Amino acid sequence: MSPLLHHHPPNNDSFTNIVSGFNWESSKKKGGWYNFLIKSIPEIAASGITHVWLPPPSHSASSEGYLPGRLYDLDASQYGTQDELKTLIKEFHSNGIQCVADIVINHRTAERQDSDGRWNIFEGGTPDDRLDWDHSCICIDDITKSGDTTTNSGGTGNPDTGADFNGAPDIDHLNTRVQRELSDWMNWLKTEIGFDGWRFDFARGYSPDITKLYMGNTRPDFAVGEIWNPLSYGSDGKPNYDQDGHRRELMEWVKAVGGSATAFDFTTKGILQAALVEGELWRLKDSNGGPPGMIGLMPENAVTFVDNHDTGSTQKRWPFPSDKVMHGYVYILTHPGIPSIFYDHFFDWGLKEEISNLTMIRIRNGIKASSTVRILASDPDLYVAAIDDKIIAKIGTRYDVGNVVPTTFKIATSGNNYAVCEKQ
């Protein structure tokens, strides 16, 4: 394994607000997604957004970009051309917004078949042999499934260091050529295209030691990993109250990566939507009296979110209840952690003003990833929490909160069954 280059960990405790700059249908946008999104930059910047997460930029067997092939071929992307992407990133930068690339490196689709008819000959997308791999760069235990058909891609590399991905050959990240050439490609995305950071797709597909290596070799200003594992459930079909094991798995991944990366807080998402759907807001306080998700243990490294292109959008693999979405944003935009706003909710659901009110309250009061939480009420129909003793968030159907909220706090914004107060 190549040596890990020393780098200073990114400062995740600044006023970081992320927006996902696409959904599952964005690649189908007439005229190109990059050309469309650039028109929205003024609105994004005005809402206090600091980072935008952009879709996978390379050629892909699927239009959405998650089955990448010719990694250097950005002109074949369904989202737009390489020049259009560079123009988009430059415009984001001129508005003070950093750009995060969706890095899909667990698996890769081949350009053509070998002499035995197996898809394992890769093309990098350049005139030279960069990323032009063969079966030696595929994990020896890789299995690819399509419907009821299971195929062996003929990999002769090392065993997979993480979870299997059935949709395309799993890449052998213990191979030093793979490590070197993927690191070079990611650094090219920084220097030539302008990206500032990474979102590691399906990061549980390879060892956190591998992510640590790529972090060291590319030194991103920001990085977040997707570690999406199911919550633990009881016999009643509901999530268990105690999800400590789930959030500790996220925390251990961050530690193993070196502490400079962040992870999407799937624990908070799962608990939050269960609490809101079931009218069980008591779930929002753990047995120690703090937030029950990753933000209760390692908030500076937890990226909170309500939905994304996988869980919501047209895929709806784990969607937040649509009538409770604003309650989700009230929670993540007032609480510790690094909040991430979904494109659809901001632009397509008519929630831009309500969400922007919350981001402005967060910025105005200096709420950061490491801010402290005092939970004042966690009943089935009422959740109240003070953050840094500067703002108080109230969620729930109960209108009369008694004397839970001190008279020194005044309502700054409110909506259907929620309110946020600021200290006067």
Image (spheres, helix red, strand yellow):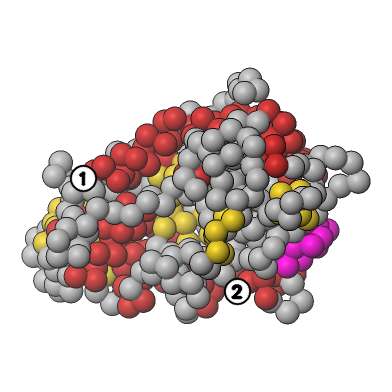
179 or 417: which is nearer to us? 179
For residue 422, say whether it is visible. Answer: no
Residue matched to label 2: 25
Residue matched to label 1: 290
Q: Is residue 89 magenta?
A: no
Q: Is residue 66 left or right of residue 129?
A: left
Mark in the foreground, 1 or 2 = 2
Label 2 element class: loop
* Percent coordinates x, y for residue 355 in the rendering: 43, 67
Q: Residue at x 70, y 53 (%)?
A: 118
Q: Residue at x 47, y 56 (%)?
A: 340
Q: Residue at x 44, y 59 (%)?
A: 359
Q: Residue at x 31, y 39 (%)?
A: 248
Whole-number angstrom distance, CA of label 1 to CA of label 2? 37 Å
Q: Give residue 392's quadrant in the image.
A: bottom left
The range drawn in magenta is 74-84
**For the view shown, which residue lies furthest in the left direction?**
402
Q: Is residue 394 depicted above or below 414 in this figure?
A: above
Q: Earlier in the sequence, mark 1 or mark 2?
A: 2
Question: Mainly helix, strand or loop, the magenta region?
Answer: loop
Q: Is residue 28 depicted above or below 118 in this figure?
A: below
What amino acid is at disc 2?
Answer: Glu
Label 1 element class: loop
What amino acid is at disc 1?
Answer: Gly
Q: Give residue 384's quadrant in the image.
A: bottom left
